[in-house]
Image (spheres, rainbow, N blue to C red):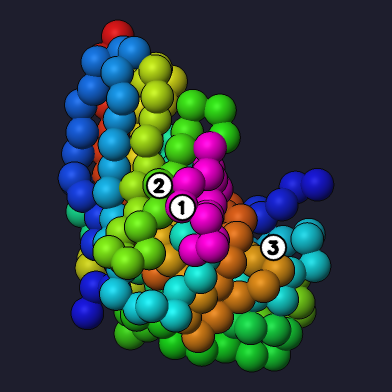
Amino acid sequence: NAGVTQTPKFRVLKTGQSMTLLCAQDMNHEYMYWYRQDPGMGLRLIHYSVGEGTTAKGEVPDGYNVSRLKKQNFLLGLESAAPSQTSVYFCASSYVGGTEAFFGQGTRLTVV
Amino acid sequence: QQQVKQSPQSLIVQKGGISIINCAYENTAFDYFPWYQQFPGKGPALLIAIRPDVSEKKEGRFTISFNKSAKQFSLHIMDSQPGDSATYFCAAGPRDDKIIFGKGTRLHILP
């Protein structure tokens, strides 16, 4: 099993460009999460989903949108990238919300 | 409002020593307390977790100590090795289908 797979692994964007980060899980988990990790800030929740077709805001949702059209996929979009969105992004999934979470390898995004 | 406070931010321990990382939580409704380990360039991975009905859980060299009355829990790494050098996150949940993470501790084990 691949677990949680994130694509791409690295990306450089210019300010104002858009992009979509893809997260795919093969564990049939209902719950999926997008986090950003910045030095000294820990893991901050951007958006999450409690099942196919659902999304909800996390701690730092501004500037991001998400979609969960299929149970196994959770997409994170940046419509107009800003330098403040330079970060490492992690996707995670869990069978039961708020319990053991499985993380992807991360996407390192730089906005210049 | 930070609901899970983790300390220290960074820790240096000699090889063979004991590494101790502490966390405190606020919400008494939490009933799941995991520790995650993250190596550079990788995603966090579950290391060990505890429920509040026990005061200690041990897996190999890793032990969680849990103090329900003080709303604190800690990770002890016995006989610390250079391969244990990583960032460690404590967490607590669930709260509205989410886990609340501490800000992390960067652990460095001196060879």
Which amino acid lies under the numbered mark 2 shown in the image of this protein? Ser
Q: Amino acid at mark 1?
A: Ser
In the rendered image, residue A64, in percent from the top left (x then y), is placed at: 41, 80
Crowd rating for badge 2 (residues with CA inside 10 Å; few <14, some 14–19, many 20+): some
Q: Which residue corresponds to the image point at 21% horizontal and 50% vertical from the top-left?
A: B7
For the N terminus of chain B, which image quadrant? bottom left
Disc 3 to disc 1, C-alpha distance: 36 Å
Residues in magenta?
B43-58
Coordinates of residue A85 in the picture (x, y in percent): 30, 67
Query: Residue B52, position in %: x, y?
Result: 49, 63
Q: For this rendering, which residue is in front, A40 or A72?
A: A40
Distance of label 2 from label 3 (alpha carbons): 35 Å
Residue closest to the eye, B8 or A72 = B8
Asked where in the image residue B20 lies, by quadrant, the reply is top left
Looking at the image, which is closer to me, A107 or A57? A57
Q: Is residue A51 above or below residue A83?
A: below
- In the displayed structure, B8 sits above or below B30; it is above
State which chain disc 1 sits on.
B
Q: Chain of mark 3?
A: A
Q: CA distance from mark 1 to mark 2?
A: 6 Å
Horizontal arrangement in the rendering, residue A33 relative to residue B4 (left or right): right
Q: Secondary structure at mark 2?
A: strand
- Residue at horizontal 50 percent and vertical 85 percent from the top: B96
Which residue is identified by label 2?
A: B65
Q: Residues within 10 Å of mark 3 (few under 14, many from 20)?
A: many
Residue A8 seen in the current view: no
How would you rate the neighbour count of disc 1 (Cα within 10 Å): few for under 14, some for 14-19, many for 20 or more? few
- Asked if labels 1 and 2 share a chain, the reply is yes
* Residue wearing tag 3: A24
Residue carrying label 1: B55
The vertical placement of A19 against A9, above or below, is below
